[in-house]
Image (tube, rainbow, N blue to C red):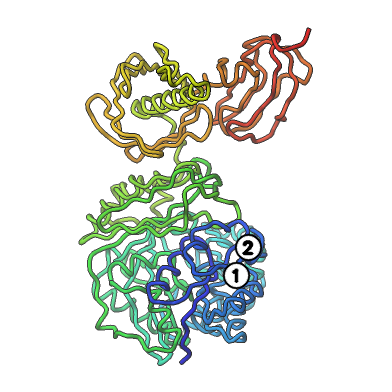
Amino acid sequence: MKQFDSILVANRGEIAARVIRSARQQGYRTIAVYSAADAHALHVQLADEAVMIGPAPVQESYLDIAAILDAARRTDAQAIHPGYGFLSENAAFSRACADAGIVFIGPSPEAMDIMGNKAASKRRMLDAGVPCIPGYQDSDQAEDKLIAAASDIGTPLMVKAAAGGGGRGMRLVQSLDELPVALSSARSEAESAFGSGELILEKAVARARHVEIQVFGDQQGNVIHFGERDCSVQRRHQKVVEEAPCPVMTPPLREAMGAAAVNAARSIDYVGAGTVEFLLDEDGRFYFLEMNTRLQVEHPVTEMITGHDLVALQFSIAQGYPLPLTQEDVSFTGHAIETRLYAEDPGNEFLPATGTARVWIPAEGEGVRIDHGLQQGQEISPFYDPMVAKIIAWGEDRDTARRRLLRALQNTTLLGVPNNREFLVDVISHEEFAEGLATTAFIDEHYAEPPASSDHSSVAHLAVAAVLLYRSTQAESQQLAVSALNAAQGFSGSRELRQHYRFGGTQGATDVFLDEIEPHLYRITVDEQQLRLACVSVDEFDLRVELDGVQFSAQYTLPARGEVLLQIRGAAMALTNLLAFTLGDEATGGSGTIIAPMHGNVMAVLVNVGDRVQAGQDVAIIEAMKMEHRLNSPVSGKVIAVHATEGEQIASAATVLEIVPDDDIPT
């Protein structure tokens, strides 16, 4: 038995923050590691100590075993928790920790080696009597052997990389004619991702459920399970929604699957937390898929229905203590569902997105838990996994858990970076999911095409955006007045009778007119529809309004001139006032500075340095939100600088070019 009182967490983001919180609750001294990109990250601030281990790229920081062990040495860390991802299933890292006299909070390197290869683990499971999907997992990788095996298995079948997961090196083959190409592309992808081109073949199980069993083993040889999780809702073999218990689980089926999982773990002398994954077909038959020798992303749903802190249990087992409970002691209460919040663009093939988390307000409420490592103002970089938070809800029954999760998703605000929150709302609201009928085919069947970019703003969004821009302009005017010592004479900003805004998007442009009736009360006209909007209260990122007698809250930020990021009733919009960049005003007209109205691609710069332009003349074209936006000069004058080039991606509020007005040109 080797006890420890300090833990270094060799990870980042929400899992690092989650492990650190449990460790501090248990009284351990905590050490974080971080890359140069994460210097101000939440997990760094939560830890008692933190060590910078390298630049942003993972190969030079979070995957650098020597740098992590050096950080442990410098801080006298006695144990290392690897989180998940990165080095969590790296047997060489586990061995290096042992060689350095540091406790690795996870299974033995031998168990990792066995289960880290799909072919070897499947052969081991077949020997142990664990039900496996019919397939080919031999070491002979000759193409003729694979093709012959595929003929015996029949189609559809799956080609899988033996050395990895996460959907990489995986291909679905519907016809044997597709097999040679699938083998070649899967092998190439596997070699690139995992350093091994070894493949296995498996019969494809149609409309199955992906069900996994949480197991725990101790150093005394005891192994138990903590029930199952249904992870069927997946996109490109990546889990999107997880829940516990499985909606179609029965006590006999749980007993059978649990026994198979425990048998699998016991067959390799497994110690610590692990997950045995199965496919469950429509007839109730289940088949071994793989074993993850680490903590899983979705472990919170198990914690919420069992009442056990699995991370704290990992700490105990790693020190040699026996499991504090038997299988009979494990019980389940209620239902829990988890969704993964990603910084990604659903309208663009769900590609990972970057940006600044200008507003981050996690929801709160009964039964709601949000695990995250995000801070307001934090940059979401391209270097790491795009998952920024896990939104989880528990309820006495599945319907209650689902409703709570739906509200939590709607009440969570992340503005400034594209994300999948509204896609998750749609999934959780879907009738098939609500009825507990979703299988691994769910997203392919119902979301075959990426959701269209939604910029069809509601009247409420348009009205609130106009008010926010107006109030911002008035605040700027008042500040100018104060600086000119006019405030003492009662100056309160230059209020005009009517303000005109034009908000554009892929659906075209909408004109909005605003009249201030009295302070904090406005008349808004949208497409000849008139509304009365009163500001009830205003905070830095939250606005409470009454629109035609109905009160509601809106979360917002004004990231750049003329731009509003706004969330109302769970629907987030990016609205840009196109007129702010085509009409001369105090900020742009006098100087002749042309500013990008939004993030976009410079399609054309229509003038050169030295050219003369007339007021209103087009000077550049920017493509944003799938529309062309023509920028024109607010003044007549001479072009003195061009800062943008054709084809360049340009940020909102960046200077495109500068013009000296005729009045300022020396004669």
Q: Residue at x 61, y 85 (%)?
A: 100
Note whether 559 is above or below 221 in the view shown. Answer: above
Give residue 58's mark: 2
In the foreground, 574 or 118: 574
Mark 1 or mark 2, whichever is nearer to me: 2
Asked whether the beta carbons under mark 1 and mark 2 sit within 8 Å of each other, the answer is no
In the rendered structure, which amino acid carries the disc numbered 1? Leu
In the foreground, 507 or 553: 553
Tell whether 568 sits left or right of 204. Answer: left
Q: Residue at x 42, y 73 (%)?
A: 23
Tell whether 262 sits left or right of 589. Answer: left
In the rendered structure, which amino acid carries the disc numbered 2? Val
Q: What is the C-alpha distance between the residues marked 1 and 2?
A: 26 Å
Tell whether 521 sits left or right of 139. Answer: left
Callout 2 secondary element: helix
Callout 1 secondary element: strand
Note whether 575 is above or below 166 in the view shown. Answer: above
Q: Residue at x 71, y 19 (%)?
A: 606
| Horizontal and vertical percent position of residue 66 | 66, 75
| Horizontal and vertical percent position of residue 135 | 51, 72
Tell whether 567 sits left or right of 58. Answer: left
Give the quadrant of the C terminus.
top right
Note whether 26 is above or below 581 in the view shown. Answer: below
| Horizontal and vertical percent position of residue 302 | 33, 69
| Horizontal and vertical percent position of residue 316 | 40, 83
User: Which residue is denoted by mark 1 in the rendering?
Assistant: 199
Q: Is residue 151 visible?
A: no
In the foreground, 504 or 167: 504
- Of labels 1 and 2, earlier in sequence is 2
